[in-house]
Amino acid sequence: MYKRTDPKTLPTLKGQCSPEEWEVRVNLAACYRLFAHYRWTDLIHTHISARLPGDKEEFLINPYGLLFDEITATSLVKIDCNGNVIDDRTDLGINPAGFMIHSAVHMARHDLVCVMHSHTAAGIAVSCQKDGLLFISQHAMRFHNRIAYHNYDSFAFDYAQREGFQKDLGNKKAMFLRNHGLLVGGTTIREAFDLHYYLERACQAQVELLSCGVEYITPDPAVAEETARGFERPNREANTRDWPALLAMLDRADPSYAM
């Protein structure tokens, strides 16, 4: 039986690491708490990773054995691109297989700071559907011509599998892992969360609609593309206003994520 440490008892790393690293730690820990809040978790499995600033190829990920609703900034594990542990205050280590998928993205896409992988019921359901994501809702249209697909090839244990993930993702930020779940990356932690949130909502709407067994309306592809571009406009106020609101919600519920 491994020794399990309560992450809230760990001496804080605040002031012991650079301000830039601490900011990444706090925002990434917040993401884990938000995944728990929205019930996107799979017990201690699935992962959210973030690249640390600087020239070194270093990343943060969850310790293997903590639930997402107890992750703190200090408890996040620092690793290299092959999942080797650099700093782990919990002594729990990580799930190497889990980081394989993340490392594939981080190595090929240096523009993506944060990578999220989930096994939600709706995400898995759509990943199993032959036609994949249907652009039938405004949430789904956000991803028009912006979704990739990767066929299931068993558990992601072998680092040789990275090439397949990289090839299928290409230059996109969101990908369905067939019969498996969702994979999303963002140029910031906030962007990655935003993309995952709305992709998950699009999947939920699709599952609900198809369960009705009725005919549905599909918008014109040109309209779907215009909608997607609207979400990408750089001056969207939501890009600066939603994340502080989400952090405020976490602060009201349990501010220990920032410990």
Image (spheres, rainbow, N blue to C red):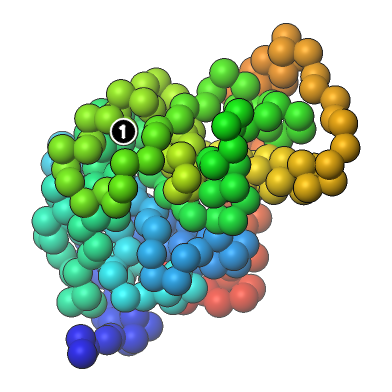
Tell me if 77 is positioned left or right of 148 in this view: left
The one nearer the camera, 16 or 129, is 129
Q: Position of residue 154 (x, y in %)?
A: 31, 48
Looking at the image, residue 85 lies above or below residue 109: below
Residue 31 is situated, as x and y percent measured from the top left of the image, at 48, 57
The residue drawn where x is 39% and y is 70% is: 44
Q: Residues within 10 Å of mark 1 (few under 14, many from 20)?
A: many
Q: Quadrant of residue 231?
A: top right
Q: Is residue 23 visible?
A: no
- Foreground: 248 or 109? 109
For disc 1, the marked residue is: 165
Q: Please identify the quadrant where the N terminus is shown.
A: bottom left
Task: From this view, report whether residue 161 is shown above or below residue 226.
Answer: below
Q: In the image, what residue type sits under mark 1? A: Phe
Q: Is residue 138 left or right of residue 168?
A: right
Q: Measured from the top left, where is residue 259 in percent x and y?
A: 39, 73
